[in-house]
Amino acid sequence: MADTKEVVLTAGDKEYKLTEEFIEMKQKELTINEEKYTPHVIEPSFGIGRIIYCIFEHCFKVRADNA
């Protein structure tokens, strides 16, 4: 496969040939700087009201004659 410089991919019953013009490999060295953020306030939402509201919203339906 390295001598012919093409790759054959099979997807389902179709076969695709990728030649050298479609494939390019590069090696890069990247430096990624990361800024971490810690919030001052953490507000968990585990109240029973939110759970019931989600159940109501999930079960809500509108009938066509009542619209």
Image: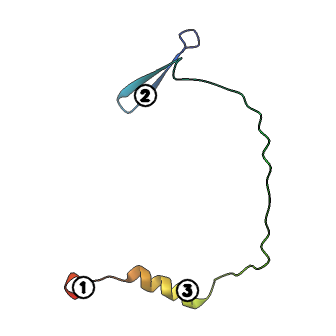
The residue that label 2 is drawn on is 10
Of the two numbered discs 3 and 1 in the rendering, the one whose residue sits closer to the viewer? 1
- Residue type pointed to by label 1: Ala
User: Of 23 and 60, which appears nearest the observer?
Assistant: 23
Image: 45 above or below 31 = below
Residue, far left: 65
- Which part of the image, by quadrant, shows the C terminus? bottom left
- Which label was assigned to residue 50? 3
- Which part of the image, by quadrant, shows the N terminus? top right
Q: Calculate the distance from the C-alpha at mark 3 to the C-alpha at mark 2.
A: 49 Å
At x 80% / y 69%, what residue is drawn?
Answer: 38
Which quadrant of the structure image shows residue 2? Answer: top right
Image: 32 above or below 4 = below
Closer to the N terminus: mark 3 or mark 2?
2
The residue that label 1 is drawn on is 67
Q: At numbered mark 2, what does the secondary structure look like: helix, strand or loop?
A: strand
At x 79% / y 53%, what residue is drawn?
Answer: 34
At x 55% / y 86%, what residue is drawn?
Answer: 50
Q: Calculate the distance from the C-alpha at mark 3 to the C-alpha at mark 1.
A: 27 Å
Of the two numbered discs 1 and 2 in the rendering, the one whose residue sits closer to the viewer? 1
